[in-house]
């Protein structure tokens, strides 16, 4: 059985749509855990209870003091009754029939620990495919050693279904009240999975709204991505895996810290000191990072990568004005 874990914090305006998407066209057993993470709006927690009354066969509600997204997910893992967990953010949705398909995959591939799938983006312009993903295909289950490039797919927890014991037996948990909790956590699980299965179906709809980490004006908090990689790279070193996956970790750091985090900062302040800190961190961890082959990146991000080498921050800013969503 799959346990769907939905952390809830002041998201009353999105929650019912999220739950409705999970319950539509479902013919297989599953449970839905709504983890009310200390909501303060006076309505989100009440709505969780109301939904549980409407759908008592499927929904359980857990109310807790605020621990952040990571802490709410950890509670869901600990309280789940299923062998698999599926994390769904309360402002996101799934496509019709997603749970049925995922359930059938767990039956067909009982040795697989991680089921990975594609997703869609919903924003002010509508719903559209995620176009920034790496080209990847795999017809049969594999391990990370066999396909290390899998690590470069989106490091999000919600575009995968996880065997719950990966967390509990390895004592790997999401950090509480931290940004970049997924990079800190799920990337450690990849080498621990005996088998991974990737499918090309888009089963999840990610709602990219103002106020998310991607759009936050709190530029200083982007420094936390350095903390996230310190945590991640330290874990790989401690477990004798750093040298094994050095090139892949280098590329992961280039894309998520050097390029993506720099872009988030540049959009707010092209003179922010974090830009130099990112450079210094890359040089300390991966001295040859400027030589990484990024020819397979989408054209716009590839251009940003090379312009960052030249510290052409103003030019990158102009590119954003010319092309939204770089």
Image (cartoon, rainbow, N blue to C red):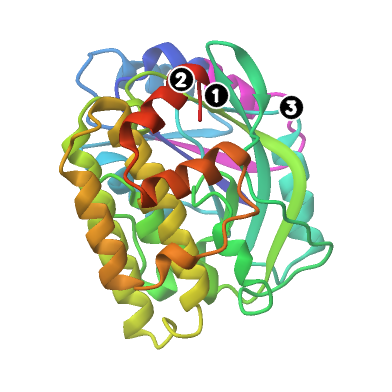
**On screen, residue 103 above or below 218:** below
Check the image and name the residue furthest to the bottom.
Answer: 240
The answer to which of marks 1 and 3 sits earlier in the sequence is: 1
Side of 34 relative to 237 (left or right): right
Please tell me the numbered disc located at residue 19. Answer: 1
| Mark 2 in CB contact with mark 3 (< 8 angstroms) | no
Q: Which residues are magenta?
A: 17-34
- For residue 15, the mark is 2
| Nearest to the observer: residue 23 or residue 253 | 253
On the rendered structure, is 304 left or right of 65? right
Spatial CA distance of label 1 from label 3 is: 12 Å
Q: Is residue 209 left or right of residue 154?
A: left
* Vertical order, 76 against 317 (above or below): below
| Label 3 crowd (10 A; few <14 / some 14-19 / many >=20) | some
Residue indicated by mark 3? 96
**First reached walking from the N terminus: tag 2 or tag 3:** 2
């Amino acid at each position: 059985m799959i346990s769907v874990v939905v952390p809830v914090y002041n998201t009353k305006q999105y929650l019912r749509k999220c739950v409705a998407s999970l319950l539509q066209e479902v013919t297989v057993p599953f449970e839905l855990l709504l983890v009310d993470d200390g909501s303060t709006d006076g309505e989100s927690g009440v709505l969780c209870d109301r939904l549980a009354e409407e759908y008592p066969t499927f929904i359980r509600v857990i109310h807790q003091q605020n621990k952040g997204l990571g802490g709410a997910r950890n509670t869901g893992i600990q309280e789940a009754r299923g062998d698999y967990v599926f994390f769904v953010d309360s402002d996101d949705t799934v496509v019709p029939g997603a749970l049925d398909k995922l359930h059938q995959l767990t039956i067909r591939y009982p040795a697989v620990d991680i089921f990975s799938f594609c997703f869609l983006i919903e924003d002010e312009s509508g719903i559209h495919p995620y176009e920034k993903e790496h080209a990847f295909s795999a017809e049969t289950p594999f391990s990370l050693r066999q396909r290390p490039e899998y690590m470069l797919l989106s490091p999000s927890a919600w575009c995968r279904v996880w065997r719950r014991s990966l967390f509990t037996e390895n004592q790997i948990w999401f950090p509480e009240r931290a940004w970049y909790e997924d990079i800190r956590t799920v990337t450690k699980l990849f080498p621990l999975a005996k088998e991974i299965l990737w499918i090309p179906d888009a089963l999840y709809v990610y709602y990219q709204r103002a106020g998310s980490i991607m759009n936050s004006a709190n530029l200083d908090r982007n420094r936390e991505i350095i903390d996230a990689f310190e945590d991640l790279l330290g874990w790989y070193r401690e477990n004798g895996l750093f040298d094994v996956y050095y090139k892949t970790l280098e590329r992961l750091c280039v894309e998520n810290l050097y390029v993506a985090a720099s872009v988030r900062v540049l959009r707010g302040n092209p003179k922010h000191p974090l830009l130099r800190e990112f450079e210094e961190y890359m040089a300390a961890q991966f001295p040859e990072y400027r030589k990484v082959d990024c020819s397979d990146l989408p054209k716009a991000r590839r251009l940003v990568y090379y312009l960052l080498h030249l510290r052409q921050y103003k030019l990158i800013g102009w590119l954003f004005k010319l092309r939204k969503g770089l």
